[in-house]
Image (spheres, grey):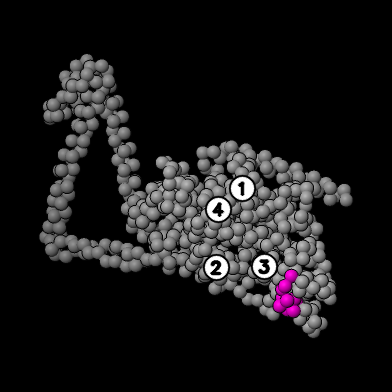
Amino acid sequence: MSARGGGGVGVGSSEVMAWLIPGVAVLNIIVFGVLWLGGTLGFAVTGNGWHPPPFSGGVYRRLLTGEVAAVWPGISPSVVYTTAVLLLAVAVSLIVLIVLKVAGRVSAKSSGLAGRREMAGLMPEQAAARARDLRPSLKGVRELAPDDIGNLLGDLDPDGPELRSSFEDVELDLMAPRAGKSTGIAIPRLLRARGAVLLTSNKSDVFTVTRQERAKVGRVWTFDPQGIAHSPREMWWDMLAGCDTIEGSRRLAGHFVSSVNDDSAKKDFWISAAQNTLTALFLAACRGGRSVSDLLAWLADPADRTPIDILRDVGMAPMAEQLQGTVRGAVETRDGIYETARQCAACLLDPEIVAWVSPDPLLPEFIPSQHVIGRDTLYLLSKDGGGSAAGVIAGLADMTLRAGVVAAERMGGRLDPPMTAVLDEAANVCRISDLPDLYSHLGSRGINVVTLLQSYRQGARVWGDAGMDALWSAATIKLLGAGLDDADFVDKVSRLVGQRDVKTPSWSSSRDGRSRSVSYRQEPILPPDKIRALPKGTAILLATGIRPALIRLRPWYKEPNSAVISKAAKEEVDGITRRAAAAWTGDTAR
């Protein structure tokens, strides 16, 4: 036993010596090379010219013993050794940077997530080629500005290039509150937009940061019926203008119904009947040239035959008969239908809201068909919860999007420049019931829609499970950020990201020596706990036809021009504060 043990020690010592001898030799060569090159550079820098000595053992011995003058006459030893140290520091720094870069790429590749090669289609070079195909106005431009080639998504983690989606992509972003939806997505998207812009929100943060910048490129329309930004009313929109057809009336009625119905996929008798009634009344008001006030009067008095007579006079007899059938039905049924309709349109009882959707000869009218072909900006601000103007907001957003589709058809298929629609808080203030069905169609028309939700479940509560699945499938770009706490959804995402092979080495010893073997096992690329714990400012990118990747968002306040934007945002906040104080003082006085 002892003999075998001693033999083992001997074998180990010989193995160490086999590596030690060449290691010492290489170390001496490196030290000599640094001293030789450092001394030569120092000699040249001091004005003596380039005179490298022989690369020999004798020179190396003199440099180690300090006999520098024998190698380079007239030079101080401190110059040689200082130059050598500086040269060594530079070399080490370069080596460390190279090692870190290579290690980062190897780590990204071994992580199972997409790297540069897989993301080539979203990188600037290919994105520029795609932009020229989608936008005829760019074909004669030699060098494209970065924002002309696509929408900025972020930078590929850990050190990759910036990634941009195309102008026909539509996007769905799921992130918890304060995870970077506004600072990293909504605000940059508005600041970088090349065409018309539409924003919906229940807060003033995006408005305050972007308003002055957007005013530099076009007119700013602020639709703020509930005083989110305390903006004075400087516009009006004819809410009934798009109700001249049954389709337009039904869509507007659907927006009011969706604002009070948590799941548009599940409509009971009262909700469906209320939508039919509102459709008829909207159609009658539009065709009869009546106002929103007349509409409210008809809702308050089911016995009023005016809308029925109007529909008959304009040749809409079937719709008139249907409305008359509702009015002549059982009193309990009729009153239930009308009461449900009143609840759906309750926000119109607020005169402040009605003023924004009624003609005003002293103010300019917002016309969606003109907005979508320019570079103007429309801010749609509304509170969520009871009494909100969500139905009105959704109606105006929907009409603007449909106007964009019509304009795109007239341009040959796509808007150029593309329109940007950021539907922030889409589940609260902009419940467009058929948004999942519109998604892919809007992208093909050059309308870049970005829907921002706090969770997958929030969307399912509005559009139903089937509707949210359709929205998820139709979105060609999906960003999943920090704070996703839905266990089922996070587990689903983990499965979508996939698994990777993990190599596990093992060692075994025998009489013949040591041997190494490798086994493989599979594990999730991103386990659910890592998805839930994503750092703020990062997101999982799911792009159609590309492996999942991890990206770092680009917040607006980290961009080069952030100081100017911050100053403008502070001015906007100060203005909101003053207007809010004035409004509060006026209310108190009354």
Q: Do the residues labelled 3 and 4 touch (CB within 8 Å)?
A: no
Residue 21 left/right relative to 358: left
Q: Magenta includes 483?
A: no
Q: Nearer the viewer, residue 512 or 367?
A: 367
Give the residue drawn at x 82%, y 74%: 305
* Alpha carbon distance from label 3 to label 4: 25 Å
Q: Nearer the viewer, residue 216 or 261?
A: 216
The residue stretch that appears in magenta = 314-323
Corner quadrant of residue 396: bottom right
The amino acid marked with disc number 2 is Asp
* Alpha carbon distance from label 3 to label 2: 21 Å
Q: Mark 3 points at which residue?
A: 245
Of mark 1 and mark 2, the one earlier in the sequence is 1
* Element marked by disc 1: loop
Q: Mark 2 points at which residue?
A: 437
Q: Mark 4 points at which residue?
A: 419
Q: Position of residue 133 (x, y in %)?
A: 42, 52
Of mark 1 and mark 4, the one earlier in the sequence is 1
* Alpha carbon distance from label 3 to label 1: 27 Å
Give the residue drawn at x 73%, y 53%: 236
Q: Quadrant of the N terminus?
A: bottom left
The disc at residue 414 is none
Q: Name the residue under label 1.
A: 376
